[in-house]
Amino acid sequence: MLFARAALIAALVACPLCTSADARGDERQTEVRPSFGGYLAGRVARGQHDTEAAAHFFKRALSRDPTNEILLEQSLIMDLTEGQIAESVDLAQRLLAAHPTHRVAGLVLGVDAAKRSDFVNASDKFKRAAVSLVGEVTSTLAGAWTRYAEGDVDGALAQLDGLKQADWAQYYLRFHKALISDLAGRNQEAGRLYERAFRSEQRLVRLTLAYAQHAAARGDRKLARSIIAEHTRRTTGNVHPYITALSESLDRNDKVPLLVTNPSEGLAEVFFGLGEALSSEGGIGFGTVYLQLALHLEPSSPFALAALASVYETTKRYESAIRTYERIPEGTPIQNSIRVRKALLLNQLDRLDESRALLERMADEDETDIRALDALGNIMRSRKRYDEAITYYDRVMDRIGTPQKQHWALFFARGTAYERSKNWPKAESDLQRALKLSPDQPSVLNYLGYSWVDQNKNLKQGMEHIRKAVRLRPDDGHIVDSLGWAHYRLGNYRDAVRYLERAVELMPQDPILNDHLGDAYWRVGRRKEARYQWGQVLTLNPEPEDVDKIRSKLAEGLPARAQARAPKRPNQAARSDVQRKKRTENQVSPSPQLR
């Protein structure tokens, strides 16, 4: 599946969301003359993920040059990104009149026709969009659902068999063939297709739900439970709330519907699946367009709404993310996860009182749910209010009873809070407990190992922990930096240079890592390179309290070795406090699991 997603993004990069003329390699000669300023402003805003402003600028430019195809296309894409489907339809019609095989315009008009149950027209528009590899895959999947909606089940399934050249797309083709077979009552064929896909993709939530719901709806609840058990066994972290809800439904002997119950939901699944894959793997612009098309078909889809909100979080559009989360209907299995996400976003917006009130209310409503208290602990820790964070983590511990493997993150979080509040004995105890629960957690190995080295205790075991963390996560610049800086602290400067160079290669924009490498260069006599690295630090937005230290090193270098133990920075064991927060908060903050 990872290969499929990487290939999907590569295909989009090779042939972006564009006209068929672009796909053929033709050079359009349209110039943006009367509205060049608006066009440039739109490009800048789009590059900053401010698509609302970009849409405004492109539209203003288009009003001055209404036949300009570049402006039409950019306005269309921005309107789609903002979910302005009605406006998009008008622009798509104008583009399709000029370019009958314009991919984006074809998809927009196809989805809009399907929304109106005009499946013949939708099928025609989807065919027009099949002008590139990605367009062909999308068109094939969408076209199969329109043929099913017209009553041509055999034709729909044959269409999904017809696309052979796109290896990365086979998962999507099989999955939708299974969904259509399931809905058409072809139970054996659907079961065979689900089972084949599930053998290699047990961790995918939508596939697991589809297969288990298929089994339960057809009366084989034993198979449904075994599918859920296999998914749970292979899942790292908490089980997805929808999986848990399905398991509880089976226990109550509830009637279980299929995952997709009509062609509109099937079409929405096409655009959600591709959009979620793209947006989660870096193709945010393309992914957002697909997610908005999915939501035009199914406006209340919890999965598509949560995926879109996640995109807004990634691009730091926190208000938009909150509004999108609030569109998710009450009572869904991810309701509490969504409320936690909303609270964390309110904190990002410095609306701490609102955030805390929401989470405290959640904690009072359900005394068995630990997510709200865990989130409060993380929020207070991010604000350096460590004693308050510890209080919340203590309340979490009271609720969990006997700790299980998945609770390692709670001990890790409380341990870092104890360390920051200068209570090392309790910090060490929690960090060791986290490792006992889950021995192969790179972040815990790194944090505990470096803390020991920094304190000149348990040096052999500390270095073993850090080396193991690097083996487990060799491309994590922070962890590789820990190993290099541990060697530096022990006076092994040549080894330090080797690992710190690798760390900076992995994270060249990190000021702390560049500073460490500069120090190591100085100790091995590479003083010009040391000053170059320190100079780099000043261009990378270092912490304000570090600026004077860097300037002093640029002017005077480091003290002689006999006098020097590396300058102590706040919580050196885990880099600067800000960087440590980013690493630890991301690993212990709850979030809705959607994949």
Image (cartoon, rainbow, N blue to C red):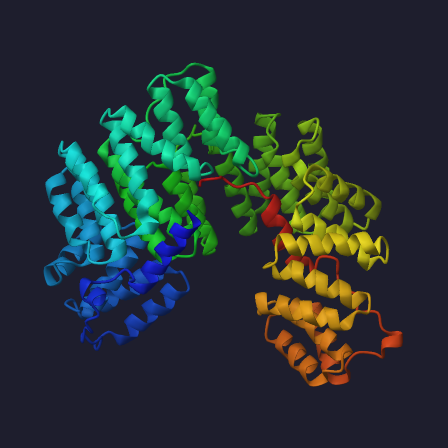
Could you say which is closer to the camera, residue 235 or residue 286?
Answer: 235
Res 9 seen here: yes
Q: Quadrant of residue 390?
A: top right
Q: Is residue 495 left or right of residue 473?
A: right
Q: Quadrant of residue 554?
A: bottom right
Q: Is residue 206 left or right of residue 19?
A: right
The residue shown at (21%, 37%) is: 157
The residue shown at (14%, 67%) is: 67
Decide: is 296 above or below 450.
above
Q: Is residue 348 left or right of residue 403?
A: left
Place of residue 317 in the rendered image (x, y in percent of width and height, measured from the top left): 45, 54
Could you say which is closer to the camera, residue 518 or residue 486?
Answer: 486
The residue shown at (37%, 69%) is: 44
Res 82 seen here: no
> Which residue sits furthest top?
253
Q: Quadrant of the C terminus?
A: top left
Place of residue 119 in the rendered image (x, y in percent of width and height, measured from the top left): 14, 39
Decide: is 373 above or below 463.
above
Place of residue 62 in the rendered image (x, y in percent of width and height, measured from the top left): 21, 66
Q: Is residue 445 left or right of residue 229?
A: right
Decide: is 45 above or below 221.
below
Q: How many labels were placed on the picture?
A: 0
Place of residue 460 in the rendered image (x, y in percent of width and height, measured from the top left): 82, 55
Could you say which is closer to the camera, residue 153 or residue 563?
Answer: 153
